[in-house]
Image: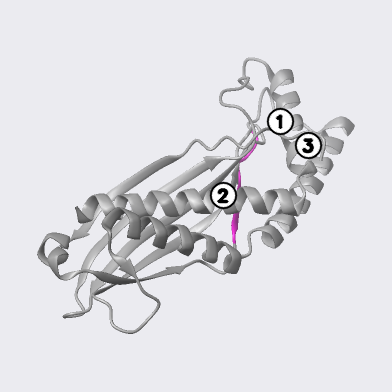
Amino acid sequence: MTRILTCVLIASSLAACGVNEFDKYRDEIGTVMVQSQLPLKAELDIADVPIVGEPGPPSAADAAVAATESYILTRFNDTLYDAAAPDALARTFEAVFGRDVAQGTRWEVVAGGDFDARIRGIVDGYGIRIDELGRATAYFRMKAKTWATIDGRLIYDDFSSHAVPLTGAPGGPDPAVDPIAFAAERAYNLQILNDLTPRELRSMVDQAAAEAAATLARELVNAAF
């Protein structure tokens, strides 16, 4: 690949209030089992291109651009499903989530046997969003749940989201103000996606999964103490 922007790991996270009864069980927790769960397929969310000016029949140039974009996005879709295999991401997610929970709480993470609580990091949905300018962002919708072994009660349940820009710079031309610059920027960013190899995309998504897991673990640790 000859042209690719550095993966800018700027994360945004939003969490909603949920169940938190750690204060009632905290002194009884010393060992935990940590698990993760991911969907079977990555999602691909492609934004519609703004329509500028009066609509009319497409020109030959418009048809050529549309065909090229369709080819790039179809190819990227195939690459994404190969690169974002849920089993591999689940291993990354669980390793980081378990490590950060253990470090933040000082609870011992065990693989089985006796444990005081079971913690599960659940990814409800993940994938890549491509915006109007052709920029790619990896996103994760997720939640963490904790059950106390002593009575099987759900003592923590909270939702979160995490997004990591992968390609493209913030800002960009307004299609209504400068449609030519907008089209050029979109073409450039889509070419970057087209140049991505499965290995490069896999590395990006894997790193985004690790950041998402760290975010979810940090929120759980902050809620627990």
Q: CA distance from mark 3 to mark 2?
A: 22 Å
Q: Quadrant of residue 193?
A: top right
Point out the tag, 3 or 1, that comes first from the N-terminus: 1
Point out the tag, 3 or 2, that comes first from the N-terminus: 3
Residue closer to the observer: 30 or 11: 30
Q: Is residue 18 left or right of residue 197?
A: left
Q: Amino acid at mark 1?
A: Arg
Q: Position of residue 215 (x, y in %)?
A: 39, 49
Q: Amino acid at mark 2?
A: Gln
Q: Quadrant of residue 141?
A: bottom left
Q: Which residue is mark 2?
A: 207
Q: Residue at x 29, y 57 (%)?
A: 158
Residue extending furthest toward the top: 177
- Specify start and end residues of the magenta stretch as a single range: 42-49
Residue closer to the observer: 83 or 66: 83
Give above or below for 26 relative to 9: below
